[in-house]
Image: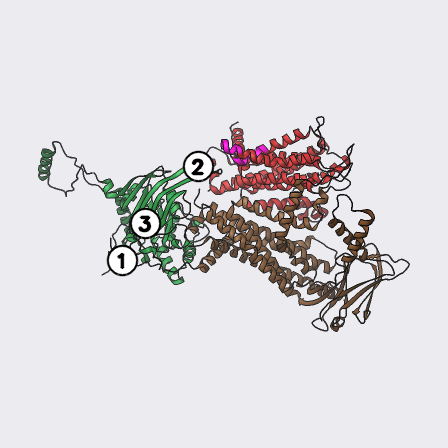
């Protein structure tokens, strides 16, 4: 045998970046050439443009703008999210099914790089689609605002209350803990704890009742809130006070009262009267110089004692809020879309990981089931307690039965799922955008860390293990 | 006669293939499980006993059934066209029309089998839901936990039994579990008939609201129409687009009265869209059961005629499309 | 210092390899490979033969890490087949060309080239040479999904050679190829082994295997039933054949008489014949000279430039490689 020449392939470790980029580029090319990208773009634009045409709202220009931001962009994001999960599920699973993965697996590419490349490719597509949807929404907004039918007052209202980025300040929390404990102790001494109700449940119910009682302001009474607010950026920075009535009172009972605001030393420097039947969130401007004194701001509502005055009931958690403009709408829109993009990234990671473990239809089903369980757990914990649902709503002639093992297990599972998924589900950027609330860069950064790294990392690990363990050559 | 035999042979094969797919089984098991869980985990709506469980059951039946129809059509027809299996069959003396109609018949059979399971689950779920009960031991709203537990256990039992049969006799797991699911649900209904709502032995009485059956039948008719749409789409599209279009047609058909119908007289396109879209509101009548109401037989007949006529029209389009489709 | 896997003489070492396919319940279903022992040395062409279901493809897939062995050990270039780094030195042509249907040949080679982290210029040069070698220069912009089976096999072979592999694993390499393509592949294999590369191939086409392989192993039911050098395995020691040029009838008569006297019977006399493949190539070559235009893959050099030995000139299929002066 003749002596052989040295290998002509350079002896260096496989460069990870070119391989990852190659796989990502392939994913993009596949989506474009299979017309998936084009179909999605068309569908997305149809949703973004079609929803405002189909949903009428309250007939005002402000209502239309909110519909565009919340419903059109929201539905577009949902469509894109569903498509991302679907495409993610198919990326690896279909290559395994069609055996193209065999030619990829015998190349010097670590399975993690395959997952990463597919993920980055899908993110690139999502970025373009989301950007296009955002650009179309922005264009539609500008076109709508340019319409001659909008009065200057409406335009000002939209600019101050919706197309802006305002930081929301809540008042100092009511220190009612001591009052709740005292009231609970008094009730237990007088009547004892009801059968089947735990002390924690009783305390929570009592606290809710107390807060509701404090949210009601009878004629002739005054309610006060204290805000710790830094000085606004400029003298002309709009500062708004916003309040909401409880759902049963809004739109039904007329309100007749006076709002006052000012620093602690001069709490009634600013006065504003409200009169009539109010619905939704009511906002009005207060002078920005009230916030520049360095002192906390005292806001009061006095229910004027007139012959037809009724008790005013504020909505718990949204009684009075101060809103200070800090960013432009464009910046707010971009940050909101960044958070939506991060959410799509997590969905893509879930889909691709499911596709690495299962066949395509099973992966799609598994991913959809996981997302549904997460969503339901989240809303379940936020809503009624399953314990209450589990109880027999019957008066038993004897001790009431405990919740069944099934319900107890279900509740534990739901709480565990909610605890794991809650950090990822806390972001709701489009609601803030439609409300003119600031989407803070810190919030976007937190979303990026959680949804681009912390949550996808274990998914990448699972996918890598699956790809290493799976016999890709099996027929 | 030959064509009928061919249609039967192909339809049976199609149905067997469809139920063997893991997704079909997963969708059915999930539908049954969700229907079973609703009365156990959620409070009833005051004023109408069992309504929440009924409506949830019908909704699961409709939504999951749409997915089953879409997926069965794509796996039986679209995938066969793509993989070349259809070419192998069409190289035999089988007409394209026969092939297409047989595929639809197989998908329809799958949907019917699914609907049987979903309908039984809804019947039992309604029995499980909280109802007012006055007796020597209990006075108030009572959930039939025993039946509820049996109902929830039925899908698991079917899966476990299918696993055992797969282990011993090497029968395919998917299709066995699918068949056993219907058997288990019937068994639950039979066993529950010997107990009252408090879980005590009683005279034979299923204790279910049989007036639910016509509403379930109407949902089944709607699913058969969807199966026809999905089968026609499968001559040209892949799984993803088929499912997307099916869901879109489902959503638009439910709101067509509101979105399009109210202005149908104004514009030609509105009129055409309103007529062309299937109006699912004809088949979605759970509210008819409010306050003890029933669905009259005459309404069932008319809805059935609408379903048959609409499906026939869609299938004609499907036949035309398949006739000109190129096979690999 | 780590041993360079390219410098070892034993390229493949399979020891007691067993592969059992199991069902969902982990019960054995099929024993595809049963106690296989095999070594392949550097620079040889080794053929794996056997009827359908004998375990050839399973063995190849285990060598590539696509399947996991149930028992035994496998070392490829001194490392485990699941080691990502060792795949730098391997080229693989599967039984079917599992290519991305929407990519063109150029894009296909560019994609796989990036996986090997080849420098851009080198990648471009190799792509051009491989496309020319595969006769797909004219079809470089067509999606692979539109190719015939033979054309898809050619691009599959091209991607297997992209990294100038030390070990080339070919599963049915000549399947779907026309006789010119078959000859080209065989010439390529010889050219590669002259440069010290190693080839492991699996095929049903015994004539092709006989033509190129140095050693073969015949599998049946997952076990090796015969193994050795082709020449030794096929040699018929009990007979001798002589090839003579055409002789005048009287001389021929005298030779036959002498043989009859020694053997006690008439010897077998027949004219040597061309193989069908040689005849086919001759006819095609003449037709090509007469009419240069044709559809399908064109005439191309048998071996791409970067795969040839330094100084070796390009040759057409069927012609021996030459050296530049």
Q: What span is colored magenta in the figure?
A: B164-180
Chain name for mark 3 = C
Location of residue C229 (image quadrant): top left
| The N terminus of chain C sits in image quarter | bottom left
Label disc, if present, on residue C28 of the rendered structure: 2
Query: Is C144 one of the magenta-colored residues?
Result: no
Chain name for mark 1 = C
Q: Is residue C315 left or right of residue A336?
A: left
- Crowdedness of circle 3 by 10 Å Cα count: few (<14), some, many (20+)? many
Q: Earlier in the sequence, mark 1 or mark 2?
A: 2
Q: Earlier in the sequence, mark 2 or mark 3?
A: 2
In this rendering, which labeled residue sits more in front, label 1 or label 2?
Answer: 2
Is circle 1 on the same chain as circle 2?
A: yes
Which residue position holds label 1? C313
Residue A79 on image: x %, y %: 61, 52
**Chain B: colour as depicted:** red
Residue B325 on image: x %, y %: 51, 42
Q: Observer-nearest residue: C227 or C271?
A: C227
**Chain A: colour as depicted:** brown
Label disc, if present, on residue C199 of the rendered structure: 3
- Crowdedness of circle 2 by 10 Å Cα count: few (<14), some, many (20+)? few
Q: Is residue B199 left or right of residue C208?
A: right
Letter of the green chain: C
Location of residue A392 (image quadrant): top right
In whole angstroms, how far apart are the C-alphas of marks 1 and 2? 53 Å
């Amino acid at each position: 045998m003749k002596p052989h020449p040295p290998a002509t392939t350079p002896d260096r470790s496989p460069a990870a970046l070119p391989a990852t980029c190659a796989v990502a580029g392939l994913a993009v090319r596949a989506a474009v050439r299979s017309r998936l990208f084009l179909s999605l773009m068309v569908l997305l634009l149809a949703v973004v443009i079609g929803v405002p045409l189909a949903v009428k709202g309250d007939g005002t220009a402000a209502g239309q703008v909110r519909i565009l931001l919340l419903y059109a962009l929201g539905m577009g994001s949902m469509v894109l999210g569903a498509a991302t999960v679907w495409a993610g599920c198919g990326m690896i699973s279909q290559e395994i099914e069609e055996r193209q993965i065999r030619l990829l697996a015998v190349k010097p590419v670590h399975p993690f790089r395959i997952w990463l490349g597919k993920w980055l490719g899908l993110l690139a597509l999502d970025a373009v689609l989301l950007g296009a949807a955002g650009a179309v929404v922005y264009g539609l907004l500008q076109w709508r605002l340019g319409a001659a039918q909008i009065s200057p007052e409406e335009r000002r209202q939209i600019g101050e209350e919706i197309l802006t980025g305002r930081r929301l300040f809540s008042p100092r929390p009511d220190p009612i803990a001591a009052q709740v404990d005292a009231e609970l102790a008094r009730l237990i001494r007088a009547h004892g704890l009801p059968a089947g109700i735990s002390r924690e449940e009783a305390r929570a119910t009592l606290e809710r009742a107390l807060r509701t009682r404090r949210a009601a302001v009878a004629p002739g009474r005054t309610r006060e809130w204290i805000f710790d607010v830094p000085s606004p950026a400029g003298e002309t920075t709009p500062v708004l006070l916003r309040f909401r009535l409880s759902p049963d009172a809004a739109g039904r009972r007329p309100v007749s009262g006076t709002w006052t605001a000012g620093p602690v030393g001069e709490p009634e420097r600013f006065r504003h009267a409200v009169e009539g039947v109010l619905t939704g969130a009511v906002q009005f401007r207060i002078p920005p110089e009230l916030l520049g004194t360095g002192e906390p701001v005292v806001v009061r509502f006095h229910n004027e004692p007139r012959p037809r005055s009724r008790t005013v009931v504020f909505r718990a958690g949204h009684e009075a809020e101060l809103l200070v403009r800090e960013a432009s709408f464009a910046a707010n829109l971009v940050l909101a879309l960044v958070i939506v993009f991060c959410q799509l990234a997590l969905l893509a990671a879930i889909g691709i990981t499911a596709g690495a473990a299962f066949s395509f239809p099973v992966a799609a089903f598994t991913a959809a089931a996981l997302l549904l369980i997460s969503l339901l757990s989240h809303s379940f914990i936020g809503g009624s307690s399953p314990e209450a649902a589990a109880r027999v709503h019957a008066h038993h002639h004897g001790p009431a039965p405990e919740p069944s093992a099934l319900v107890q297990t279900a509740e534990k599972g739901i709480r565990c799922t909610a605890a794991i998924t809650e950090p990822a589900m806390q972001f709701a950027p489009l609601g803030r955008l439609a409300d003119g609330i600031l989407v803070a860069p810190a919030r976007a950064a937190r979303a990026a860390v959680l949804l681009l790294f912390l949550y996808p990392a274990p998914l990448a690990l699972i996918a890598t293990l699956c790809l290493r363990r799976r016999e890709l050559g099996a027929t | 006669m030959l064509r009928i035999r061919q249609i039967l042979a192909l339809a049976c094969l199609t149905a067997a293939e469809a139920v063997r797919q893991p997704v079909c089984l997963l969708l059915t098991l999930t539908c049954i499980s969700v229907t079973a869980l609703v009365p156990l985990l959620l409070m009833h709506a005051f004023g109408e006993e069992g309504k929440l469980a009924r409506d949830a059951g019908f909704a699961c039946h409709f939504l999951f059934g749409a997915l089953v129809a879409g997926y069965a059509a794509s796996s039986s027809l679209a995938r066969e066209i793509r993989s070349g299996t259809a070419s192998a069959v069409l190289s035999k003396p089988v007409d394209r029309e026969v092939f297409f109609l047989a595929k639809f018949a197989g998908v329809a059979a799958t949907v019917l089998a699914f609907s049987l399971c979903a309908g039984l689950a809804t019947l039992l779920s309604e029995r499980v839901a909280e109802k007012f009960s006055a007796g020597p031991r209990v006075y108030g709203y009572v959930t039939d936990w025993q039946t509820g537990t049996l109902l929830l256990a039925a899908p698991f039992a079917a899966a476990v039994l299918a696993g055992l049969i797969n282990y011993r006799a090497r029968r395919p797991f998917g299709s066995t579990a699918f068949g056993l699911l219907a058997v288990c649900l019937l068994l639950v209904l039979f066993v529950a008939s010997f107990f009252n709502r408090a879980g005590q032995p009683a005279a034979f009485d299923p204790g279910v609201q049989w007036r639910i059956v016509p509403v379930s039948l109407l949902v089944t008719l709607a699913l058969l129409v969807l199966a026809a749409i999905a089968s026609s789409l499968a001559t040209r599209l892949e799984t993803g687009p088929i499912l997307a279009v099916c869901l879109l047609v489902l959503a638009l058909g439910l709101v067509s009265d509101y979105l399009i119908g109210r202005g149908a007289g104004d514009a030609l396109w509105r009129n055409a869209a309103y007529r062309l879209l299937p109006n699912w509101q004809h088949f979605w009548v759970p509210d008819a059961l409010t306050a003890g109401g029933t669905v009259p037989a005459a309404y069932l007949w008319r809805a059935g005629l609408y379903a048959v006529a609409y499906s026939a029209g869609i299938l004609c389009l499907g036949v035309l499309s398949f006739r000109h489709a190129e096979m690999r | 210092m780590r041993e360079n896997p390219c410098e070892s003489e034993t390229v493949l070492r399979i020891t007691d390899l067993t592969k059992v396919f199991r069902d969902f319940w982990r019960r054995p279903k099929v024993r595809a490979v049963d106690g296989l022992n095999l070594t392949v040395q550097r620079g040889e062409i080794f053929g794996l033969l056997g009827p359908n279901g004998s375990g050839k493809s399973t063995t190849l897939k285990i060598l590539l890490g696509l399947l996991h062995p149930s028992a035994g050990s496998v070392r490829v270039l001194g490392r485990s087949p699941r080691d990502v780094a060792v795949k730098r030195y391997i080229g693989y042509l599967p039984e079917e060309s599992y290519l991305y249907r929407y990519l063109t040949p150029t894009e296909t080679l560019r994609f796989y080239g990036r996986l090997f982290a080849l420098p851009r210029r080198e990648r471009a040069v190799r792509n051009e040479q491989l496309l020319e070698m595969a006769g797909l220069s004219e079809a470089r912009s067509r999606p692979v999904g539109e190719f015939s089976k033979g054309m898809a096999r050619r691009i599959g072979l091209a991607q297997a050679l992209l990294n100038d592999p030390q070990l080339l694993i070919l599963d049915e390499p000549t399947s779907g190829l026309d006789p010119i393509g078959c000859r080209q592949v065989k010439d390529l294999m010889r050219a590669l082994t002259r440069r010290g590369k190693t080839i492991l191939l699996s095929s049903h086409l015994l004539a092709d295997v006989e033509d190129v392989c140095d050693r073969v192993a015949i599998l049946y039911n997952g076990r090796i039933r015969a193994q050795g050098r082709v020449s030794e395995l096929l040699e018929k020691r009990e007979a001798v054949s002589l090839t003579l040029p055409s002789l005048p009838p009287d001389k021929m008569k005298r030779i036959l008489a002498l043989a009859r006297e020694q053997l006690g019977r008439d010897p077998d006399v027949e004219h040597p014949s061309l193989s069908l493949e040689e005849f086919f190539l001759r006819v095609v070559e003449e037709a090509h000279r007469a009419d240069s235009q044709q559809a399908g893959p064109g005439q191309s050099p048998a071996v791409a430039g970067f795969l040839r030995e330094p100084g070796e000139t390009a040759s057409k299929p069927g012609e021996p490689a030459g050296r530049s002066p």
